[in-house]
Image (tube, rainbow, N blue to C red):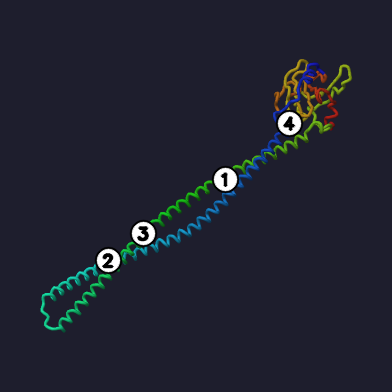
Amino acid sequence: MHLLLCLLLLVLPFPIEAATTQERLRGTQQQLEEQRRALEETKRQEAAVQAELKRVDEEIRRLEAQLAEAQTRLEAARDHKQVLETQRAQLQTRHDELAERTAQLTRILWTATVQLEHSRQESWAEADREGTWLAAILQEMRHSRAQLQDERRALAAKAAAVQAAAEELAAQERRLAGLKEELTRQRLARVKRAEALRAQRLQGEAQLGSLLSALEALRRQAALEAAQKVSTAKGKLPWPARGRVVGRFAPNASPPSTGIDIATAEKEPVRAVAAGKVVHSDALRGLGQVVIVYHGETYYSVYAFLAETSVGEGQGVAQGDVLGRCGFSPKAKGPGLRFELRSGAKAVNPLEWLAPTP
């Protein structure tokens, strides 16, 4: 094997990827669990708000019943006020009538008294009649005054009742307006909170779905990578190029051969024997263009004497991807390929790893 290639394989470190599929799988699983917990908490809060909203709705229905009852009382109070106003007007009319009657009786009594003092009484019977008449007038006047006082007190009581009813009406109206405003504010606040939590839950469910999809994709990728491990594919790897073996693995020969040489057709495509990452794609003196692919674990595959390459360093390749085209191979004395398979720095016999030719 060419000395430069040996040195290159010795100094090439095992690539350390930023995040392996297993690491990304674990990270995604952790994110999934965190998202599930966050979603459960959001659902719990949403359920709590819905329960609170239900409680508020029940309170609103209860208060609406009270408001309806209060409205009925308000209507009754208005009717009562109207009745009191009517009674007050009637009392005022009665009061005026009694006042006028009392004034009339007072004038009659005064006139009769003056006439009695200046008139000559002709007989006892006439005087008795006049005295009885005056006493009756006096009695009626006293009754009218007493009735007038009662009416005045009743009028004052009615006026006070009308005022109290008006004040109660105003207080009930203020309370009604306050209850309506508070109910509206409480329900609006809880509806907004419920809407915000619903949006948060929907977003969380969407994120959870995305994480589940990513997790499933990573699981498929991990399963595929596990199935494609070179260490488990001994005797099953596809050939890197179609052709005839013209040089075999002979590490103890002189000079030693750490790979195989394959004679191919001109410009025959060279394909990766397994998925991996390109760690070298450049010319090496005496070997033409050389591509080295790292397959994970400790395995490398080497493709030499290429006329051209189609991959660059750091590029990921799948099994069967074209790495380049065969060039001139000294062993094949024409178009061909030198292929090696290594575990770390140790060369292994490619023929033991490649699938049998048909």
CB atoms of marks 2 and 3 within 8 Å: no
| Camera sees residue 244 | yes
- Real-space Cα distance between discs 2 and 1? 66 Å
**Quick one: SS at disc 3?**
helix
Which image quarter holds the C terminus? top right
**How many residues crowd mark 2 within 10 Å: few (<14), some (14–19), many (20+)?**
some
Answer above or below: position of 210 versus 64.
above
User: Cα distance, mark 3 to mark 1?
Assistant: 47 Å
Which label was assigned to residue 197? 1
| Residue drawn at the location 42% of the way across and 60% of the way down | 71
Are dots 1 and 4 in contact, CB under 8 Å?
no
User: Could you say where residue 142 lies in the image, as x and y percent from the top left?
Assistant: 24, 72
Does label 1 or label 4 sit earlier along the sequence?
1
Report the number of numbered marks: 4
- In the figure, residue 203 lies in which quadrant? top right
Q: Residue at x 50, y 50 (%)?
A: 186
Question: Considering depth in this image, is 93 or 254 the residue closer to the camera?
Answer: 93
Binning the other alpha carbons within 10 Å of mark 1 as few (below 14), some (14 to 19) or many (20 upward) gives many
Q: Point out the frontmost of discs 2 and 1.
A: 2
Residue 8 placed where, x, y %? 77, 19
Q: How many angstroms separate mark 2 from mark 3 (CA)?
A: 19 Å
Pointer 4 residue: 318
Residue 158, compared with residue 39, is above or below; it is below
Q: What amino acid type should be assigned to the residue bearing mark 4? A: Ala
Residue type of the residue flagged with mark 1: Leu
Task: Looking at the image, tell me whether mark 3 or mark 1 is earlier in sequence order.
Answer: 3
Of marks 4 and 2, the one in the foreground: 2
Question: Which is more toward the observer, 277 or 261?
Answer: 277
